[in-house]
Amino acid sequence: MKSLRVRLTIAIVLITLAASTIVGIGLRSYTQREFSQFLEVEAEFEAVEFPDLGEVERRLGSGDPDEAVELLEGLAGSDRMILLGPSGEVLADTAPGGERISFRDGELELVAVVPGETGKRQRNETMRLRGGLPLTDGSDRVGTLFMLPGRSGAGPAEPATGFRRKISGAHAVGVAVATLLALVIALLLSRRIVGPVESLTGAAARLAEGDLSQRVEVESADEIGNLGRTFNQMAESLERQEQARRAMTGDVAHELRTPLTHLRCKLESVQDGLLEPDGNLVDELHGEIVHLGRLVDDLQELAQAEAGSLPLYPARVDVAGVLDEVVRSLPSNHVRVEAGDSLPAVHVDPDRLRQVLRNLLENAMRHGGEGTILLEAAQDGDRVAIQVVDEGPGIPADQLDKVFDRFYRTDPSRARETGGAGLGLAIARKLVEAWGGRLDAEPGRDRGAAFRFTVPISA
């Protein structure tokens, strides 16, 4: 189960089911027990054994209710007797409790006003009784008698009131148990979720302070695990970029230091009178200054390309014509062009295309020796693929992608005069990427190296 959303949903459902099941089972058992006791109490009120009431009936039938009431009070003892007249009016109550008494459809209803607890209103408690004893004088009904057995400390509405209070208490306990159970499960689940998040937060804070070695342990395959893996990838990327930045700073300093040191030594030699400022010296110093200017221009162009702010002016370009033009401008006759006669026009900045071709061809001439350099162009779907292949020693397989890094040389022992600054291929790749293409290096067919890129066909 990899999705955190699914796991959270299932956890919530389980919490609800567990709490509902436990509370439901507990309340069902408790309610059944209490209701059984309540029915027993009700049965006590309904299954009452009445005393001999023949004399009471005769006196009521003779129209002497007061004497009937006196006789009834003597028979009641500790029990409570309520005597109702033929029309349901209360004739006597041997133990009045202040309730409102009514009789309807053979059912006696007692409504007691119970004072509320602190801060609460008073409420009515109702008890209904059936099973009253009809009193007759011959064939005429002269009254109805209800008898409530004596219960110590119990008011007339005590059975119903007690039952409701117990059920309310059981509900309160059930809610408390359900809440506690949900809290326990939520705490266990939160530890499972919040733990990795807290670890990730701490690692992110230390990363923000500059510790790029921060990584987090990934133990799950859900969204939290994906977040951890993404964080680790980001940290690794930042660490690589920081290492590349430091390396670039060192490389730039080295590339600038060499010509500057040369210039300084030559100028100090002139100042000390060790060298004469002749034309050859001026040409040499001028060459170093031109090299410095080219290096600064390349760095600025590379920075613009990486930032996506390099200005491009695409137009409809004849590929074959550009290839021939670039080859004619090179100081080498070892370049052979192979391009079809029916190559479609491409949509690209012509100056940038010439720059990419020139960088690749100069790199091939620098590393390809005296062998032939092949410049090929052919249609590849909705693009034109261009390839530069030399016959040099080639590029080791583990360095095929590194050759596009700034200041990278496959042979570290190469001097700056023979190996260049190491920016040409990096700039060429960024220029190709700027028009949506890709520049890759691969081994040549027989030997040497091949550099291939694509150009979009003009619509």
Image (cartoon, grey):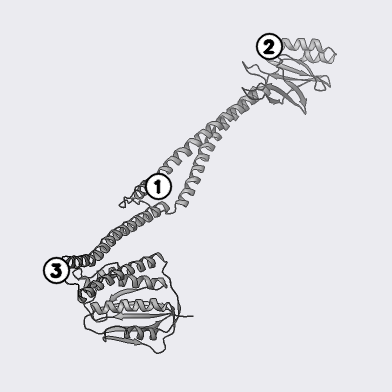
Residue at point 60% right, 30% down?
35
| CA neighbours of label 2 inside 10 A, class few (<14), some (14 to 19), many (20+) | few
Q: Earlier in the sequence, mark 2 or mark 3?
A: 2
Alpha carbon of mark 1 to alpha carbon of mark 2: how far?
Answer: 76 Å
Mark toward the viewer: 1 or 2: 1
Mark toward the start of the polypeptide (1 vs 2):
2
Residue 274: give its label.
3
> What's the amino acid at mark 2?
Gly
Q: Residue at x 33, y 77 (%)?
A: 452
Viewer-side residue, 253 vs 164: 253
Q: Distance between the Cα atoms at labels 2 and 3?
A: 144 Å
Q: Which residue is at the far bottom? A: 341
Q: Quadrant of residue 146?
A: top right
Amino acid type, residue under disc 3 in the picture: Leu
Real-space CA distance between mark 3 and mark 1, rounded to the nearest whole angstrom: 70 Å
Residue at screen point 26% across, 86% down: 334
Q: Which residue is mark 1?
A: 197
Marks 3 and 1 close (CB-CB < 8 Å): no
